[in-house]
Image (tube, grey):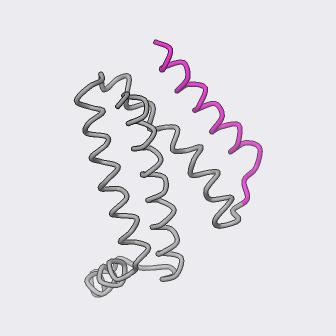
Amino acid sequence: MKSWVLIFISVLLGALGQVCMKSGMSHLGPISLRFSTIFTTIFQMLSSPFVLLGLFLYAVSTIFWLTVLSRLDLSYAYPMISVSYALVLIFSWIFFQERFGLMRFFGVLLICGGVFLVSRS
């Protein structure tokens, strides 16, 4: 499989993992990491099907990423992860109806422009 396809699969799965984890945590509501409640909180997080799905997608993403790292220079491959910013922005808008302003949009666009420049080197 081509390296850029592996990068895209890794980035896509990572972004989808974030969406799943956000969905699961939204159902739990705000949490606290106080020492007295840490084990209960962790149990609640790991009992959420969406959190578990998100972690699974992250693990699969990592397998693809390790394959990428075995083939490409880290200085070339790592900036490609930045494409996930754009994917998460789009997915957040679609799945959570999150709003974003022009500054955030142009910031992500600037990041993607930088990734394009790195990919041309």
Residue 18, position in %: x, y?
47, 59
Residue 2, position in %: x, y?
38, 28
Q: Which residue is pictured at 48% across the width and 52% down the height?
A: 15
Point out the stretch of residues depicted in magenta. Answer: 99-121
Q: Which residue is pictured at 55% across the width and 23% down the height?
A: 116
Q: Is residue 110 left or right of residue 64?
A: right
2 vs 51, nearest the viewer: 2
Residue 76, position in %: x, y?
38, 22
Q: Is residue 92 magenta?
A: no
Quadrant of res 96: bottom right
Chief SS of the magenta region: helix
Q: Is residue 92 left or right of residue 13?
A: right
Q: Vertically, is 17 above or below 67?
A: below
Q: Is residue 105 magenta?
A: yes
**In the orientation shown, which residue stands out farthest toward the right?**
102
Q: Which residue is pictured at 51% across the width and 62% down the height?
A: 19
**In the orientation shown, which residue stands out farthest toward the top?**
121
Quadrant of the frame with the N terminus? top left
Q: Vertically, is 69 above or below 43?
A: above
